[in-house]
Amino acid sequence: EIERNLHDAMEVVRNVVYDPKLLPGGGATEMAVAMGLRRAGLKVEGVQQRPFLAVGEAMEVIPRTLAQNCGVSVIRIVTQLRAKHASACDAAEKSGVSQPCTWGINGTSGELVNMEDLGIWEPFSVKVQTIKTAIESACMILRIDDIVSGSKKSAR
């Protein structure tokens, strides 16, 4: 177990050395993406709006899971985190200056904290790969579902 953990830590260091971009942890990045997708979805009409809202909702799984693992009220904490990010987006729209919201969930206490102050960062490359893999998996499931539902129709 120790060997595996050491190997994982060395891979994280390698990723940061090759691509030194970092994102705030604690679900802050996922909540920021969710807020951006929700706001973009509200600008779209009709059926095209649904994918934006669905992916935005799915991005909140990470903060929700963090809150659940800490044993705090999931609904209360996620709602507070969503409000923090929404107010940051509103402030950025009013001022015209994009200021990233780095508020997330402290994985130990379950409190909302600024991840920049706490020093919790995640490699950009890992986060991007995770999101790409999740979207590719969802697309594959939709394709399989489409094939299965198509075969059921032709069997009739």
Image: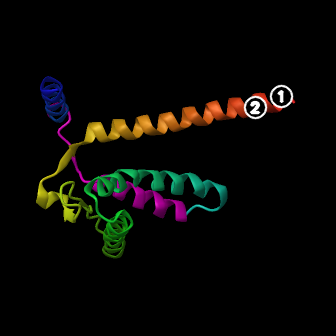
Mark 1: amino acid: Ser
Res 34 → quadrant: bottom left
Residue at x 40% of width, y 51% of height: 61
Mark 2: amino acid: Gly
Extent of the magenta region: 17-42
Residue at x 12% of width, y 61% of height: 117
| Quadrant in which the C terminus is drawn | top right
Residue at x 19% of width, y 29% of height: 8
Is 13 placed left or right of 66 in the picture?
A: left
Is 151 placed left or right of 57 in the picture?
A: right
> Which residue ends up furthest to the right in the rendered image?
156
Task: Kindly identify which residue carries mark 2.
Answer: 150
- CB contact under 8 Å: marks 2 and 1: yes
Task: Kindly identify which residue carries mark 1.
Answer: 154
Residue 5 horizontal/vertical position (percent): 16, 30
What is the secondary structure assignment of the residue under circle 1? helix
Which sits in the foreground, 78 or 68? 68
Residue at x 35% of width, y 68% of height: 89
| Quadrant in which the N terminus is drawn | top left
Residue 67 horizontal/vertical position (percent): 30, 58
